[in-house]
């Protein structure tokens, strides 16, 4: 969320230094969601690119809500299905849809 704030303020230097390296790699990596539920190679880079797309389409305010929603989930519910359901219950269905679509790409 700090990086989103920096981007919102027009500061790309911190973003590029911290996360920018993940974006070019993401397209060539396997999907985040696998049939067996394993963690694919490059999941962090792929996830970074996915949430950057959500940021671009939804803005910093929504990104802050996404982070807060995940942080407030009980540990037992910190999984993709519970997270997406919590987002939808919280009025963030559009962001949840973008995330869900990006899992299989």
Image: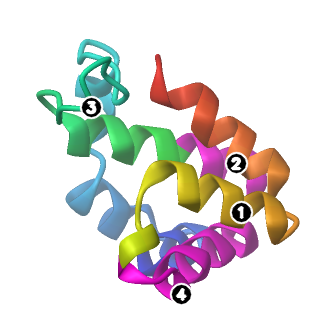
Give the image location of residue 36, x and y in percent.
24, 22
In 3D space, how far apart are the residues under numbered discs 2 and 1 (Cα atoms)? 6 Å
Q: Is residue 21 visible?
A: no
Q: Which mark is residue 96?
A: 2
Q: Is residue 52 left or right of residue 84?
A: left
Answer with mark 2 or mark 1, whichever residue precedes in sequence.
1
SS assignment for the magenta stretch, majority: helix
Per the image, the residue denoted by label 1 is: 87
Q: Which residues are magenta?
A: 53-75
Is residue 64 one of those drawn in magenta? Answer: yes
- Viewer-closest of 32 and 10: 32
Q: Residue at x 32, y 17 (%)?
A: 35
Between disc 4 and disc 3, the foreground one is: 3
The reply to whether the C-beta atoms of the residues labelled 2 and 1 are less than 8 Å apart is: yes
Name the residue tied to disc 4. Answer: 72
Query: Can you give x and y, in whole percent of width and height, for residue 88 in the image?
Result: 79, 58
Secondary structure state at the residue bearing disc 4 = helix
Which residue is labeled 3 in the image?
A: 37
Question: Marks 4 and 2, Cα distance to the nearest angstrom?
Answer: 16 Å
Is residue 49 left or right of 82 when viewed as pictured? left
Nearer the observer, disc 3 or disc 1?
3
Residues marked 4 and 1 touching at CB (< 8 Å):
no
Q: Is residue 22 magenta?
A: no
Q: Residue at x 63, y 47 (%)?
A: 54
Mark 1 falls on what kind of element? helix
């Amino acid at each position: 969320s700090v990086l989103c704030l920096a981007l919102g303020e027009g500061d790309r230097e911190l973003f590029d230094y911290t996360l920018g390296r993940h974006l070019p790699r993401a397209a060539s990596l396997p999907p985040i969601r696998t049939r067996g539920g394993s963690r694919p190679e490059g999941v962090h880079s792929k996830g970074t690119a996915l949430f950057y797309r959500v940021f671009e389409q939804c803005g910093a305010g929504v990104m802050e809500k996404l982070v807060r929603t995940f942080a407030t989930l009980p540990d037992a519910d910190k999984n993709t299905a519970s997270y997406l359901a919590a987002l939808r219950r919280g009025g963030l269905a559009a962001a949840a849809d973008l995330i869900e679509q990006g899992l299989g790409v």
